[in-house]
Amino acid sequence: IYYINTHNLERCLPYQLPALSLHEGEPGHHLQGEYALTSTHLPDFFRYAEDSKYYLAPARFAFNTAYGEGWGLYSESLGHEMNVYEDNYYLLGRYGFEIFRAARLVVDTGLHALGWSREQAVKYMVDNTLTHQSELEKEVNRYITWPGQACAYKVGEIKIWELRHKAEEKLGNHFDIKEFHHQVLSCGAVPLTVLEMIVDKYIEEATPKQEI
């Protein structure tokens, strides 16, 4: 179950709900969390990682944003293959989210590498996304105090797609999308370099011996 804050209904954009549901529900974070909980081969600190309490690190294992949120964004993109985005109305929500994540990359870089002010960052987000300014002001405060975290979403998604395309190319007709997803989800919230090693091992093991 995930909940939608309806306090300001006029700022709730219904056309974003399919993409949001894919990200937070199935096959997004809900499935991701269930996979971790049922993966008894993993140590407990991987299975029960607290994604909302980053401040506990290093006393507890911190959530790996690139892996966790990368899967969330990848799940949104799966909506095309799953035929979730039934018309242009829902595609607007999907691509609105895409634009928002791309703008984050620009703003985070501007703030922490190019000397942007808070006002410049807010203006860029207002000019280039569909989100209300009051929400964007809170978002920019987050980027200021948490360098790189928002960028990690897109970095993780790009890596998962890179690994999927690699597996598809290497395995051809032997590629199994369910098995690929199993490999990605069953390892826990690992760094992207470790995830790549896991997928490479899957590719090697799934390749027919005469083709190696």
Image: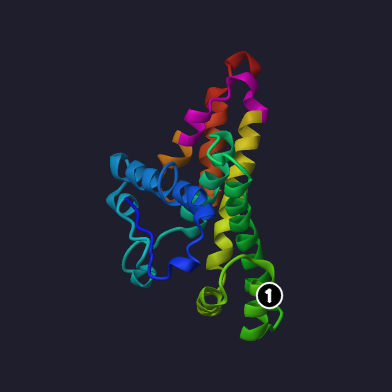
Determine the image quadrant of residue 41: top left
State whether residue 190 appears in this view: no
Q: Amino acid at mark 1?
A: Tyr
Tell me: residue 4, above or below residue 162. Answer: below
**Residue range corresponding to the magenta coloring:** 169-181
Q: Provide residue 93's location: percent of width, then percent of height.
A: 58, 53
Q: Residue at x 42, y 70 (%)?
A: 8
Q: Is residue 180 magenta?
A: yes
Q: Is residue 65 magenta?
A: no
Residue pointed to by mark 1 = 124
Q: How many marks?
A: 1
Q: Residue at x 35, y 48 (%)?
A: 33
Give the left or right position of residue 53, taking residue 125 as reference: left
Q: Residue at x 61, y 84 (%)?
A: 118
Q: Residues within 10 Å of mark 1 (few under 14, many from 20)?
A: some
Tell me: residue 65, above or below residue 38. Answer: below
Give the left or right position of residue 87, taking residue 21 as reference: right
Question: Residue farthest to the top?
Answer: 210
Residue 109 or residue 22, whichever sits in front: 22
Q: How is the image coloured?
A: rainbow
Name the magenta segment's main secondary structure: helix
Q: Provide residue 126's location: percent of width, then percent of height.
A: 64, 74
State whether residue 133 appears in this view: yes
Question: Residue farthest to the right?
Answer: 114
